[in-house]
Amino acid sequence: MPANRSAHSGLLRRGLAVVAALPLLTLAACGYGSESTDTNSNEKVAAGSEKIDGLDTVKIGYFGNLTHATALVGREQGLFQKALGATKASYATFNAGPSEIEALNSGSIDIGWIGPSPAINGYTKSDGKSLKIIGGSASGGVKLVVNPKKIKSLADVKGKKIATPQLGNTQDVAFLNWVADQGWKVDAQSGKGDVTVVRTDNKITPDAYKAGSVDGAWVPEPTASKLVAEGGKVLLDEASLWPDKKFVITNIIVSQKFLTEHPKAVEAVLKASVEANKWINANPDEAKAAANKQLEADSGKALPAEVLDPAWKSIQFINDPLASTLNSEAEHAVKAGLLEKPDLKGIYDLTILNKVLKAEGESTVGDAGLGS
């Protein structure tokens, strides 16, 4: 471990430290997320299966977002359970990154799907001891959607109220960076300035938009498409701001303790993830339906076609964690004043993923010099 890593133990400034205590992050009954206990017919343990690493259970976390469709589809199709044999795949769903990181740190989950900003924050706050990013999952699926009656051009965003999901989250950082690139000034902590940034839970944002409390939002799918269904207009797709129109929106993380003690279980989950992405890309319509079915099972409500269809089209499902873009996102957080320059060396361990990819005849992926 680099000698200067301890100097980064206070990396997050006061504003990000407050994030974990925000009311919208009130945790559900299982302690850190909503425990998912239903089992579909595809999740049955095959007769004659054996446990992996002697484990009774592998605990998997994800968000109820389409940007986490690898996990949604992998679960709905029974791919995780199939790969784990007689070791039960159990699940917990989350609404916010800090609560998932807390669950990982406490052992309430072992492996999780999560956005880049909370992965960076979790790694740096623990002095590089809590987690590893072990794979990619999705790129894209983030848009600036506005009220076309109030905002007709990018220049019109100045002076308006724009929602982001949470102080310091991935979309909040991206929007603050874009604002700075326009030459406008916003205080990152308060959200006040040439643009007013309104931190609003994705579940609430469509209602806030309808009520006129915000003039637009920089949000992930399916929230972006929900706003369009309410009359909003896509003013900017974040993918257009990145090289090759690709940037990481969802990573796969694991606790370092679990990775060290149960590499075979980690390999099984990654094998299922690669299989899920392969199936998604080969069968987009069936995969879209499977993801929506799991969303309904988790939340009690499926997405309507007018939201699901455009949202699905804007997301790419890939195994590459797009490590160079994670580094850029960290730099954006530093630029916004939400993060002191972090030492991300060692945040990735793609050894097992690349082993799986080679076995599947797929191209291996790189860590942009940020590997173990």
Image (cartoon, helix red, strand yellow):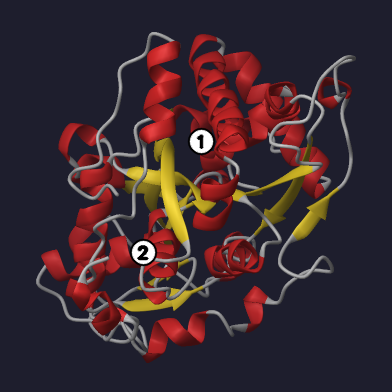
Q: Is residue 65 left or right of residue 108?
A: left
> In the rendered view, would you say 54 is above or below 179?
above
Q: Which residue is mark 1?
A: 311
Q: Position of residue 5 (x, y in %)?
A: 26, 75
Residue type of the residue flagged with mark 1: Ala
Q: Quadrant of the N terminus?
A: bottom left
Q: Position of residue 194 (x, y in %)?
A: 22, 81
> In the rendered view, would you say 52 is above or below 348?
above
> In the rendered view, would you say 322 is above or below 215?
above
Q: Secondary structure at mark 2?
A: loop
Disc 1 from disc 2: Cα separation: 24 Å
Residue type of the residue flagged with mark 2: Lys
Residue 333 or 218: which is nearer the viewer?
A: 333
Q: Residue at x 41, y 19 (%)?
A: 357
Q: Position of residue 21 (x, y in %)?
A: 59, 85
Q: Residue at x 39, y 91 (%)?
A: 14
Q: Which residue is mark 2?
A: 150
Q: Secondary structure at mark 1?
A: helix
